[in-house]
Amino acid sequence: MQDFLNKVGKKASRAADIAGNKASEIMEVTRLKSKLNDVNQVKNAAKKDIGDYCFSLYEAGKIDDPNIIELCKKIESAIEAAEHIESEIEAAKAEYAARMDAGDPNLND
């Protein structure tokens, strides 16, 4: 019986060691992933800053690189599209408000 209890105790001890090691591994990996995330945030912020700087140079006519010019033109197109959509939103709101003020029973049409 004593031999059986010793075996059970050793197995339980090994299982606890394995679980402890796994927990330590998970904690270390989580710590490193957090550190990697912080580094990636710095990298992405720097890339955004470079993009903003290049776009401001483009707007000032100080960019000669055709690849950067092409990318800046895409940004300009997106800005124009966003402005158009914002105008459509305001028009839709104004139309809805006018219909509501007029007591239009078909507001969902």
Image: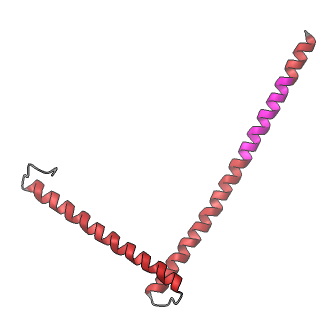
Percent position of residue 5, x then y: 88, 14
Q: Residue at x 92, y 11 (%)?
A: 2
Residue 72 lies left or right of residue 91; in this view the side is right
Q: Which quadrant: the N terminus?
A: top right
Q: Residue at x 59, y 63 (%)?
A: 41
Q: Nearer the viewer, residue 71 or 34?
A: 71
Residue at far top of view: 1
Q: How many marks?
A: 0
Percent position of residue 38, x then y: 63, 60
Residue at far right of view: 3
What is the chief secondary structure element of the magenta stretch?
Answer: helix
Q: Residue at x 37, y 73 (%)?
A: 79
Query: Magenta part of the protein: which range?
Result: 11-28
Indicate whether 15 appears above or below 1.
Answer: below
Q: Residue at x 77, y 33 (%)?
A: 19
Percent position of residue 73, x then y: 43, 80
Residue 1 lies left or right of residue 28; in this view the side is right
